Image (cartoon, rainbow, N blue to C red):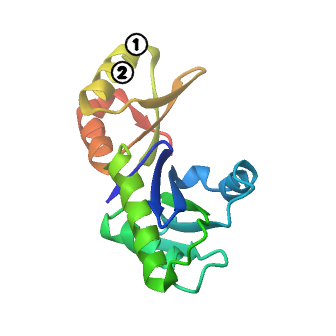
């Protein structure tokens, strides 16, 4: 599965209608449709499709045709997200009507093409599920622990200093397991 970290925009035209596709991380989706409506007041539709993982690692999918004929806009965009194995992303297609009706087939092709275009221009990366691990260490072990974290590729670290150091790190399960094995006696599990 693949995801994105930043917004990407692509534009496609079909019979004078303009389709502006925005691919965003799922964290940016809330309120983004309203933002696009405000930014494009003369547009006819803002069609959406999204795929995300919930806390139980189940894929959640949703789409909206936004007053386009049923199944002609949101579902084709969602099918592209499925086919490209995208996760934790949303695509929003802004449509400006060009004066010529496209018909159901034309709409399906246009929304599919716009979604493919924005994905092809995005900076995708492989999705990896991150877990959090909390532990404690003594002060003399700090440099060694930071070195080991760098060795296994973990760079998301929070430290809280008290009588001991409380650490909270995030990474893939494989990286966390490798760190635990390397750190062995340097850490005490807090959680």
Q: Earlier in the sequence, mark 2 or mark 1?
A: 1
Specify the label residue 62 is tagged with: none
Residue picked out by circle 1: 140
Residue position for label 2: 146
Please identify, in this view, whether the residue under mark 2 or under mark 1 is nearer the observer: 2
Residue 157 in picture, x, y percent from top left: 47, 30
Dot 1 lies on which element? helix
**Number of numbered discs present?**
2
Residue at left offset 30%, top offset 25%: 150
Q: What kind of element bears circle 2?
A: helix
Q: In the displayed structure, would residue 159 be above or below residue 106?
A: above
Residue 47: image location, x then y, percent: 59, 68
Q: Closer to the camera, 28 or 46?
A: 46
> Mark 1, residues whose alpha carbon is within 10 Å: few (<14), some, or many (≥20)?
few
Q: Position of residue 32 (x, y in %)?
A: 66, 53
CA–CA distance between discs 2 and 1?
11 Å
């Amino acid at each position: 599965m693949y995801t994105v970290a930043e917004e990407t925009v692509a534009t496609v035209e079909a019979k004078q209608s303009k389709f502006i596709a925005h691919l965003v991380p799922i964290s940016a989706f809330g309120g983004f449709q309203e933002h696009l409506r405000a930014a494009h007041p003369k547009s006819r539709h803002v069609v959406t499709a999204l795929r995300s993982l919930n806390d139980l690692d189940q894929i959640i999918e949703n789409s909206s045709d936004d007053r386009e004929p049923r199944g002609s806009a949101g579902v084709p965009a969602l099918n592209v997200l499925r086919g490209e194995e995208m996760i934790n992303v949303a695509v929003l297609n802004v449509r400006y009507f060009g004066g010529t009706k496209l018909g159901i087939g034309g709409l399906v092709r246009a929304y599919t093409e716009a979604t493919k275009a924005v994905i092809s221009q995005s900076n995708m990366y492989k999705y990896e599920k991150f877990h959090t691990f909390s532990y404690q260490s003594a002060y003399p072990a700090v440099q060694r622990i930071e070195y080991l974290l760098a060795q296994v590729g973990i760079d998301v670290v929070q430290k809280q200093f008290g009588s001991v150091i409380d650490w909270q790190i995030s990474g893939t399960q494989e990286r966390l397991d490798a760190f635990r094995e390397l750190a062995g006696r340097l850490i005490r599990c807090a959680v």
